[in-house]
Amino acid sequence: MTRIRMNTELRNKLFNKIKHTFENEDTQERNAFLEAREDVDQQYTMASELAKEVVERAYPPEDVAILRTFKKKYGQPCDVVAKDKCFYFAHTEDVDDEGDQKQTSTHFDFGLFGNLNGSEYGSDEGKKFAVAYYREELKAMDCNPDIYAQQNENKDNPHKTKYVDECLKALGQSNGSYHSTSDEVGMHKTFNAPYYLDVIGTSYCRSRAIACTKDEYEQFETWRIAKANVVSKHQTWIDTITKQCDQLKIGLKAYRYLSEGIELATELGIELDEAELIRTNSTGLTIYNPSNLASMIKGMKNKTQTREMKIMARKQYEESIN
């Protein structure tokens, strides 16, 4: 029985199959990530309901309705109601060192790409949350949602930029910039839709800090921490996979025969069908297996048929169908 030699395609097939198993193993790191995503869903529900209470306390729905009526009647001069999903919430229950009342405020963005540090500007942290939250959907679209975690220690580079851009485009964000409400598409639009609230005043949200209590403020911070936890747990999980895959690449590169790779998979508790790997391989079998290489070459030979041979073949065909 001829031993099948390794080639690049076989190594890649083995690597991808084993990596797929790594990614779906029931590990503490993976479970922690999945739990963090479940928790952020609950935190989003509670925080968005609270935000609705706080915002409507500042901008009562009846006032919003009146202003919309005025807009219909008077047009642009009364166009002062807008939809928003990010807000400056502020409380004044703390005091400074001198005992004077002080205001504590920060920016809370309920959008998919919302910043995680209180800034009103976008950052990689918001994008990291987005790709981690929609990891399975992005994988199904042949994107790499783990790219930020895999490249965590590296500066921006063409490889990273390529896969990040693919993820953002798949999510509904183009060129790394925020869409306006009317331009939001796909998962970006679906995610953001429930969190838009009516506010009075069309200027930037920084200019309209909305009053809340200290307890309410801390609940908003708890929700934002839950978003950051998704990013952190995703990073930890992917770090463990990356370390395993680094060692896997070294081992597969050193192996000369496919049987060694199969043995490695077996030792890892992964059942692989050698025949299937070879059968689906485009070049490895025909190049390294003498029997199959011979069959392939014979099939390439230019065979000449005489007129008599063609007539005989036709008669045989007609007899076979009668």
Image (cartoon, rainbow, N blue to C red):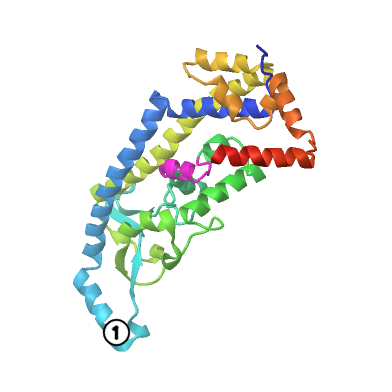
Query: Where's the N terminus, which quadrant?
Result: top right
The range drawn in magenta is: 133-145
Indicate the position of residue 227 as horizontal and vertical percent values.
Answer: 38, 43
Which x, y percent locates residue 308? 76, 39
Q: In the rendered image, is residue 35 in sight?
A: yes
Query: Residue at image x 70%, y 38%?
Result: 312
User: Which residue position holds label 1?
Assistant: 72
Image side of residue 254 versus residue 164, left or right? right
- In the image, is 269 to the left or to the right of 6? left
The secondary element bearing badge 1 is classed as helix
- Which residue is farthest left? 62
Residue 223 location (% of width, % of height): 32, 45
Q: Residue at 48%, 25% (x, y): give it.
A: 22
Corner quadrant of residue 156: top right
Residue 171 horizontal side relative to residue 302, left or right:
left
Say if the magenta span includes residue 52. no
Amino acid at the residue labelled 1: Lys
> Is 242 above or below relative to 182?
above
The structure residue drawn at horizontal position 63% and vertical position 20%, both measured from the top left corner, is 252
Question: Where is residue 137 drawn, in percent x and y?
Answer: 43, 45
**In the image, is 56 to the left or to the right of 156?**
left
- In front here: 295 or 100? 295
How packed mark 1 is, by other alpha carbons closer than 10 Å (few <14, some 14-19, many 20 or more), is few
In the rendered image, the residue lying farthest to the bottom is 74
Q: Nearer the viewer, residue 84 or 265?
A: 265
Return the residue nearer the eye: 177 or 67.
177
Q: How many marks?
A: 1
State whether residue 289 appears in this view.
no
| Quadrant (top left/top right/bottom left/bottom right) for the C terminus | top right
Q: Pick the residue in front: 44 or 246.
A: 246
